[in-house]
Image (cartoon, rainbow, N blue to C red):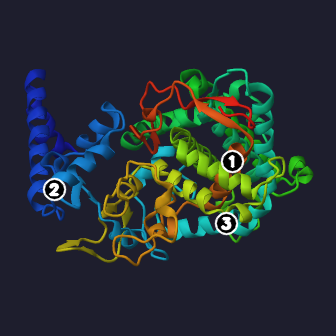
Amino acid sequence: MAMWYRMIVEPLAGWSWQRIAASLFCMWFAYLVIVGTHRLYFHPLAKFPGPKLASVTQWYEIFYDIFHKGQFTFEIQRMHQKYGPIVRINPEELHIDDPDYYDVIYATGKPYDKMQYFSDRLNMPLSSFATAGSDLHKTRRAAIAPFFSKQRVSAYNHLIQDIVDHLSHRLSTEYTGISKVLNLGQMWGAMTSDIITDVVFARPMGYINCPDFDSQFTTAVCDMLFTSHIRAHFPIFLTVMNTLPSWLVKILAPAVKPVIEYEEMLELQIKDILAGRNEEAKLSSHKTVFHDILSSNLPPCELTAGRLQNEAMSVVAAGVETTQWALTVGCYHILANVGIEQRLRSELEHAVPDPSRMISVPELEKLPYLSAVIQESLRMAYGLCQRLPRINPRSPWQYAEYNIPPGTPVSMDAYHMHNNESVFPESQTFKPERWLNNPVGPDGTTPLGHYMVAFSKGTRMCIGMNMAYSELYIGLATMFRRHRFRLHETDRSDVEFAIDMITPQPKLDSKGVRVLVGPLQQPF
C-alpha cells in the first residue's frame, strides 16, 4: 500500500485541481479514441456496413430512442435504404431486412438467447418474456404455455363473448343515435384489460364499466411503455425506482399509480393462492394461470411471489396494448373504406342471421373476409414494432457473403417485414383481399401467412396468440354485426405508426380513433 501511495498519490499532491481535471479529461478522451478505433477497425463487426457513428457509440441509438422520441426503428429503415439488407446499427448489433431470413433468426427449437438490455424495458426481469438465457426461458415458458393453448383458450371464449356483450349493451344504451363521441381505442383497451384480468387471473376488474371506457389502468399500461427506452439504456434508473417504496413511486409518477396498485393486488392474490386460501378462484368457473404454474415442474426458487408477480404483469402488458391496437387499427380502416365495410357486413349478416346470438369462434374463423380483415389488421398493427435481437452463442450465422460471429445479437422486426413491397405490394394500403384464396409470397409457393410476424416466430413467439385471435374474431364480428359507426374528427394519422415504444404509437397529439354510433337498421 505504501508503495502505491508513493507512486501515485505523492506525485499528485502538488497538482492544482485544474491540472488534475485536465489530465482526467485527456485520459477519458484517449479512452474514447482507443475504443472508437477498435470498434471501427478491429471489432469482429467492423466489416459490416452501417453508419460510422452508430458503430462507434450506443449514443447514436439513444439519441433516436430518447431525445428523438422513439424514432430509431425509422432510422434503421433509412440505414437499410442506404447500406443494404444487413447493417450494423450499434457497436454490438446487426439488423437484417430480408423476409426470407426471418426463419433463421427466429427458428423453432433453437437455443437462441435474448439481449439482457432489451429485457429491462418492461421492468419484469423474472418473467419468461424478459428471460435472456434460452434454457431458463424454455423452463419458464413451459409452465404457462398450456394455459394459452388453443384448446384452453376455446374454453374461455364464452367469457370473452360475455365481456363483449356487456360492452355492446353499453353502446346500445349510452351511445346509439345521440351523437355521443366514442373513443374506440379506450373501448377496446377496457375490453382487453377486462379479458386478461378475468380469463387469466379470475378477477374481473370491470374496466368496461368506466365512464367513457376511460380506464386509468389501461392508460397507465400505455404510459409505462413511454419510459421503456430510458429503462433499457439507463438501467440505473430502473435500479433506483425498484429500491423506492411503492407509496413514493405513486407520488413521483402518479400516471403509473393504477399499475402499481394492480401489482400490489396481484401480490396479495398470489400469496393467497400459495397459502391455499384464494376464495375468488374457488368461486370462479376456471383456475388462474398461477395454478398452472404452481402445478408445473418448476423448482421452488421459480415459485416465489416476486417471480409469479413478474410473470403475471408481463402477461397483462402483452395482452392489453397489442390486441387493443390491432382492433383499433382494423376498425379505422374498415370505416374509412366503404367497400370493405359493406363486404364485411354482408358476410356477417349471412353468417349471423340473429345479431343477438353470435356464432362460435370456430365458425367465425371459417368466414373468409372476416379472417382476411383480421390478418390485414394485424399486418398493419405490427404487434411489437420493436426489433427483437437473438443471439446464437455457439455457432455463426451466414448471411449472403457475411459470416456473423457467434454471440452477435442479430435482429429483425415486424415493421420491416410487414412493409416489404416484394411480399406485400402497396404495403401502406389496407387490402384484406390480399389474404383471400390461399395467397402465396414472391416465390410463388410459400404461403403469404408465412411472412406474417405480428406474433413473432420460433421458441419465443407470443404466447398469447390464440387468445388475441379470439378477441379479434369475437370483438370485430360482434361490433360490426350489431352496430353502425361513423368516423368523427379522425384521420389515418391517428392509426399510423409514428413512435416506437415497444408497441406502435401514433403521433403525440392524436386524440384517438373517435366515432359516432348509429342504429343498425338505418344507414349511417
Amino acid type shown at disc 1:
Gly
Residue 165: give x, y in percent of width and height.
80, 43
Q: Which numbered disc flags the more N-terminal residue, 2 or 3?
A: 2
Q: Are marks 3 and 1 in contact (CB under 8 Å)?
A: no
Residue holding disc 3: 366
Q: Which numbered disc flags the more N-terminal residue, 1 or 2?
A: 2
Residue 326 visible in the picture: no
Q: Marks 1 and 2, Cα distance to the nearest angstrom?
A: 42 Å
Residue holding disc 1: 475
Residue holding disc 2: 83
Amino acid type shown at disc 3:
Lys
Q: Identify the residue at horizontal 74%, vertical 39% (top origin).
A: 265
Which type of secondary structure does the marked residue at label 1 adopt? helix
27 left or right, relative to 336:
left
Amino acid type shown at disc 2:
Tyr
Work out whether residue 4 or residue 21 is closer to the camera in this orientation and state it.
Answer: 21
Which type of secondary structure does the marked residue at label 3 adopt? loop
159 left or right, relative to 60:
right
Q: Which label is found at residue 11?
A: none
In the rendered image, which quarter contains the C terminus? top right
Residue 2: give x, y in percent of width and height.
19, 43
392 left or right, relative to 350:
left
43 left or right, relative to 247:
left
Which type of secondary structure does the marked residue at label 2 adopt? helix
